[in-house]
Every structure is written in C-alpha cells, then in structure tokens.
Image (cartoon, grey):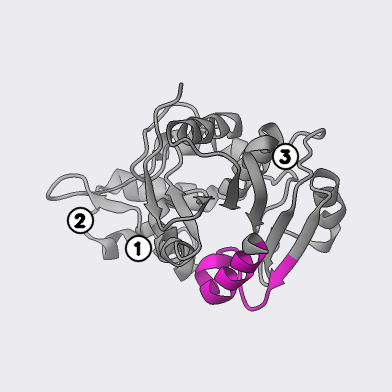
Amino acid sequence: MSKLLNAKTFGEGKPLVILHGLFGMLDNWQGLAKEFGQFFETHILDQRNHGKSFHSDFHSYDLMCEDLLAYLEEKNLDKIYLVGHSMGGKVAMLFACKYPSRVERLVVVDIGPKYYPPHHQEIILGLNAVSAAKVHSRKEADTLLSNYFSQTGVRQFLLKNLYWQTPENLAFKFNLPVLSKEISKIGEALYETAIFSKPTLFISGEHSNYITKEDEALIESHFPDLEIVEIKNAGHWVHAESPVEFFELVSRYLIY
C-alpha cells in the first residue's frame, strides 16, 4: 500500500477530488476548492514528489494512480468527481480508465491523452541552477530562473514552491532530482485500449496548444461521452487565469 498523500478538504456533499500538475501543489487550488466546497466535499491532494506529500525515487502515472486509490480507500470515498490539470489530468484519465466504477464524472484540464515530447528542459535547468545556488531570497531565485526562461507567470508559479529549508537557505518542496530524472515519463500517452465511457469534460485554454482540433478524435476514442470547452483569454493554467469562468463551468457540469 502506498503512503498516504497530503491533502486538505473543504465543504460537504458528493466527493470531488482535484489533482494538480507538474511542479504544482494543492495550495494552487485552495481558493477554488473553497468555492467548490459550497457544493461538494472537495479534496485537494499533493501528488507524490510534490508539496508536502512523500518523496519517492519513482514517479509514473501508474504509481500516481495507486497513490490516489490508496487515498480513496483510506478516506472511504467512492463514486467521486475527479478533476485533474496537466500532469494531474493524465493521472485522472488513467485512473478513470483503470477504475471506472470509482469515478462518476471526469474533468480534464488542458491536457490530452496523446504523447507529448519533452518540453520542460529550460525549466528543469533553471530549477536545478536555483537548487545548486542555495538561494537566500525569492528575488535571487527569480533572477536565476530568468536566465533560463522569460515567462514571468511560469516563474511565479514555480517560486511558490520555495520554503525555508534552513534559516539561511530556500529550497523547493518538490523532489527535483527525481522529477528531473523521470521527466520523460510526464509526456507518456494514455494506453491505446483505455476507455472511460462515463461523462467527461475536457477544458482547454484558448492561448494554450496542449489540446488542438486535431486531438479531438483521439480524445473521443478514449472518452466517448465527451464535451470539450475552450475558455477564452486563458493559457495552460486555465483555472488560475480564469477562475470564475472555470468554477462556473465545472460546477454546472458536475451538478447537472
């Protein structure tokens, strides 16, 4: 049995479980989780090697599915609504296909079931540079990261993971050595025969290229009871960039 994932819970009602993406943590979803708590018993989880959850030498979608299963069994949760963003969306897809009886409705945020070639190289290099430098301030870390990639929003997202490892030095909460080593696995495709036939909503950001029109046939082959909605003026972090629209869309879909 896996170690139990770190989690926070808000509200009452049918269980809703939310999974963050790569280099994320449950704190990224806390504001929305409180809103969802008006209607659902909302669980936000730190996945393995992220946030305050356990570190492991191994990181794969099958293992993250087993982590989620262990959490649901420990909390006696069944017939959940499951939401996942990016890496968390891949976990959610695979989990729903492996354990369809446990998932009532699925929401996948800005990721598809296809293979994605490695595209985080600059981020990995920048994060490792920050880690090696043993930085003393977030500004120092941001300056270092800016040498590797320019997107301010991405840097701010990553810097939320910094904590005071010692009174002098900041470090990242996520398990950077293992995520650096296992990064190629993050882009893996959903296996070809995986099917989840219950209602599934895919949400994409207008300015993101993670889900394209060309992907829709493949998505439908895995998730035949499908709806795809694009949120305007949003990129990959749809829920953070358009939280009100995201909340209303997902709430309507789940309450139905």
Query: Whole-percent x and y of residue 76?
Result: 47, 35
Task: Say whether residue 166 is left or right of residue 85.
Answer: left
Which amino acid type is shown beneath numbered disc 3?
A: Ala
Q: Which residues are magenta?
A: 229-253
Label 2 – label 1 distance at C-alpha: 11 Å
The amino acid marked with disc number 1 is Asp
| Image quadrant in which the C terminus is located | bottom right
| Looking at the image, residue 33 lies above or below residue 50 | below
Q: Position of residue 46 (x, y in %)?
A: 42, 45
Magenta span dominant secondary structure: helix
Q: Mark 2 or 3 closer to N-term?
A: 2
Coordinates of residue 211 in the picture (x, y in percent): 73, 59
Residue farthest toward the left in the current orientation of the protein: 167
What's the amino acid at mark 2? His
Mark 3 packing: few (<14 Cα in 10 Å), some, or many (20+)?
A: some
Q: At numbered mark 1, what does the secondary structure look like: helix, strand or loop?
A: helix
